[in-house]
Amino acid sequence: MTNWENKIPAFLLFQINPSRDSILEGRTLSELWSASYLLSWMTAHAIKAVTDRLGPDSIIFPSLRGNPLYDWLHREQRRHSSVKGEDSAPGTVAEQLGREDGLYRRLAATPCLPGRFLALVSSEFDPTPVLDQFNPGKEDSAWRLVCHACWSFLNAASPFTAAQRRCWEDQIANFWRVTWQIWPWHDVDIALGLLEKTWAQNPAALSKAKALAAAIPAEHREARGTPLEPVWAWNIHWQLADHRFRARQHTHDFSASLVNPRLPNDSLSGRPEAIVDQPWLDKARQSLELQSVFRGYTRLGTGSLIKRVWPVAFLAKRGLEADRFAEMTAQVGPAGVGSDYGFLVLDTDAFCQWILNQKSPLTALAVSSETVQNVGADAKNIEVEKRPESSSPPSAHARLKWSEALSNFSLHGARRIVEHHRGRLVYSGGDQLWAVLPVAEVAACIRGLRLAFQGARELSERYPRLFSQAESGWIRLDNPDRCEPTGPMLLPGPGATFSAGFALAVRHLPMSEVAWGALAALDRSKARPVRRMLNRRTGQFIAYPQAGWDRDAMTFVALEPGIESLYWGAKLDSPGGETFQFVLNLIEGTSSPAPGRTSARRQALQDLALRLKRYPVEQPLTPGWAEIALRELDWAIGQPEFGLEERERRHLLELGRHYLDHLLNFSFHDDDVTQPAPRPLSDFVNLLRLMVFIARDHD
């Protein structure tokens, strides 16, 4: 461990590229998981290169407490210490980490680390051991071990030529693009001066916060974190580090690569040259282990080859097989998902930005209001934006707890809920979650994930066999496994929110296209309902309506080749989710089942959507048009062929009324001002059209 005496602290920002684009180059669910896990695997080794010198507490984000993949890398070390008599009692961490089966192996085989981390290091910290993990020329680097295992595996099944070997070496040397920045902490005045020269957030507010904190009498100041010490400027140091990091991130290091104009490019990414040809693939398919990997003639570069075979060539020898995805892949089909299953992307609404200090707090959040009220007149005369209801300084401890809360949700709350709803996690780390879910379960799963994210008391009531009763903002597992925490775990809390995007498609669409569709739906969930653009001639801003939901929302998209994508969204706490689930139950026959009823109900909803499209559906909804839509709904579901009991008809009509009222009275917050923004009638029509799309395979 480093001796911190007389050391200057510094931020280390580290990011691995390519990340999301590289992950989404896969065509199947297994390839998507494999690419996600490769990114988490390399991140884990980069983090370990830091923690081996400074300890795990040096990592601010992501949280390493209870992280199964990070613990898996230390299992040999823990076993060795257990042999020497340390932590050798039954049931200890050393024993749990030595297990290579059961739930712990499933947890360790889940991609649970993002391609980015933030660490607190010394200004003299040498990042070379971290960078060496991506160097294929280093004998014991993580990347070399993976590449060597994959090369040996592939070459044994179908030998490569010398030219292919040279192309392989060139491409593995240029596969990863690593960006890093070390920023030493300066005195507060120097840091504030540097911040004012950059395009930063709220530098004036932080200057006021310093003046306010400086006016506090010495006897009332904390022992650490006064305006005279660099630690007080935690947020300022972050913004300066992030500014330098982004400048370096947008500077590309171009290196020479072998280019053979006779070779085609990789079919998935379109960038590197493909190193396999038809004769090589024909021989590779004779191997039982490679028959399922290479189904057709797909030109693949080195990176795509490694992502396809490294679970078998490398992970399987370490007890981390991807067999848990075999069942789900068989259910959703080898190529992609259909209208029975879809791809869910969940993104925390700016929560990760608070952890990484990308959101600079105002003065009121940097200094407690009670402090302002209890100090002398000099401090009271300093302007403060507003008094918060409750505030805590954005200290290092707060950042660590927020990071831990996000990790607890991703690793323990989200996994249990997704699997309870017959889904599988593809990625669960950082501020995003990817999963494959049945369409019939997605709305209920999103509601459950929101309860877990906020640590609501209702969570244990909705999932009594998964969670026990805990205080608000906390979670406790019911009947945990030996490798799971037994006590309460902190969660983001009641005020935290997330947004979700869900994509479903016809069966022959590749998984990558479905995943990109889910990300596009997520962008709609997070976008503002109104976009303001400056009119340069008048100097005034003009408001243009758009299809956003201003976060805390979910958006569905139905994908079909040759047809415009169908979008439908709703706020998470709106009647839209309940209406979606009730109508879906009617369509699937789980409510009032009868032979041929699905087809009749689908046709009735399709006819209703066509009638409503004759009205001005793209205009903001008015009370008159809302009443007309409700009457049309009442007439459609009241027909004998729809087959609803009177109780069900009244309930559906009431849900429709509440949903239309929500669209009519929709509003959002803009600069702390509530702005009315009535939604168009197309939101109601698209809900009906989405149900028709889902019901096509239930005839």
Image (tube, grey):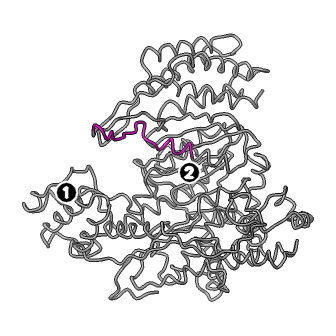
Tell whether 378 sits left or right of 235. Answer: left
Residue span colored magenta: 520-538
Residue 494: percent from left, percent from top = 41, 48
Q: Residue at x 33, y 41 (%)?
A: 534
Tell whether 71 sits left or right of 103. Answer: left
Q: How many numbered discs sit on the rendered protein?
A: 2
Instruction: Between residue 498 and residue 237, name the one nearer to us.
Output: 237
Q: Quarter of the image holding residue 67?
A: bottom right
Q: Residue at x 66, y 10 (%)?
A: 639
Q: Residue at x 65, y 15 (%)?
A: 645
Is residue 43 a member of the stretch shown in magenta? no
Residue 151: percent from left, percent from top = 78, 75
478, above or below 278, in the image: above
Q: Find the residue positioned furthest to the front.
A: 261
Badge 2 is on which residue?
Answer: 467
Residue 273: percent from left, percent from top = 73, 66
Q: Which amino acid, by three-letter code, is at mark 2?
A: Phe
Q: Find the residue positioned furthest to the left.
A: 377
140, above or below 457, in the image: below
**Circle 2: element type:** strand
Badge 1 is on which residue?
Answer: 370
- Mark 2 and mark 1: Cα distance apart in space: 37 Å
Given this view, does label 2 or label 1 mark the residue nearer the observer?
Answer: 1
241, above or below 418, in the image: below
98, above or below 598, in the image: below
Q: Earlier in the sequence, mark 2 or mark 1?
A: 1
Is residue 522 a member of the stretch shown in magenta? yes
**Circle 1: element type:** helix
Q: Which amino acid, by three-letter code, is at mark 1?
A: Glu
Instruction: Between residue 84 and residue 33, name the one nearer to us.
Output: 33
Instruction: Between residue 213 and residue 620, name the one nearer to us.
Output: 620
